[in-house]
Image (cartoon, rainbow, N blue to C red):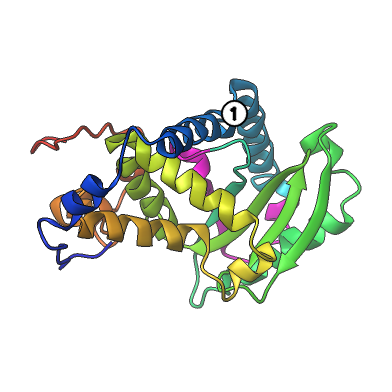
Amino acid sequence: MANGLKHAPPHLLSHVVNMIQNDNPFVKQLCQEIHIFSVNQRQSENMMKARNEYIELIRGYLNSATIANQLEEGVRIDRVAVFGSFITQCVSNNSDLDLCICLNFEGEKSPMPVTVLQSVYRDLQHNRNLKQFFGDHRITHLSFVSSAKVPIIKFKMNGIAVDLSAIFCTSPPRTCVAAKFINAYCQLDDRFVILVTFIKTWLRSEGDPNDHLREFPNSYALTILLIHALQWYGIVPNLYKSHNEMFNPQKVKSWDDVDVGHEFTHPLDENS
């Protein structure tokens, strides 16, 4: 979300565009393959419906007395927020579910969020009555990545990857603001969605996904770099600068402020 961003030389982009021969058969084939790739990556209505069902089941489980009884005194789960590509127009048929347990604490010194994750992880490991929360949906590939920059619980629900993090907060976390920020660019131009989907697909083919949680840049970091590059060429506007009140985490105070349903148009007007 760079603010003081310089632009490329004015004629650089037009020079690059003029070098591309649109009638070249290889360029035409590439355009066709990009279109096919985009169509194949789309998430169907059934996929979307299933993932939304999983989210509600996980929320019900985390808000249950089973979990509440295992939390330290004064700790309360306020909500389970969804962020990441699933709530943006960059969602694909391979998109996982990124969930954040938003916590409140009443007391003198709040515990670390990782202790809440540890409690949830232990319950997922040893609770023999998970069926009452998840029905016939299977929880598999359960692991706790404590060495990540942000510790998370990873598991799969009917084969769909779920990443569960936790944070103590009184306003929407940065991850939710970031999702709205990226989705705004998705709404500005469909080609941005294709670019992001391509990057995420490429990233999945590169190395161990757990490395992306530690040292290797993850898809979010690469998407921000992509936005930076597009701003440098003057292809997309700097929304962080023009709409700072919407995308500056320090100014976002309510959950309504991170609603990704806000419709952006291009060119942006003063009311968008």
Which residue is located at x 80 percent, y 57 percent? 142
Question: Residue 189 in the image: x percent, y percent?
Answer: 30, 36
Q: Which residue is denoted by mark 1 in the rendering? A: 48
Q: Quadrant of residue 135?
A: top right
Query: Is residue 245 found inside the magenta-colored segment of the image?
Result: no
Q: Which residues are magenta?
A: 66-91
Label 1 amino acid?
Answer: Met
Quarter occupied by the N terminus: bottom left
Quarter occupied by the C terminus: top left
* Residue 23 appears anywhere in the view: yes
Give whichever of 28, 222 is nearer the camera: 28
* Residue 260 appears anywhere in the view: no
257 with respect to 49 (left or right): left
Query: Is residue 85 found inside the magenta-colored segment of the image?
Result: yes
Label 1 SS: helix
Determine the residue located farthest toward the top in the rendered image: 45
Q: Quadrant of residue 55?
A: top right
Which residue is located at x 60 percent, y 74 percent? 214
Determine the residue located farthest toward the right in the rendered image: 128
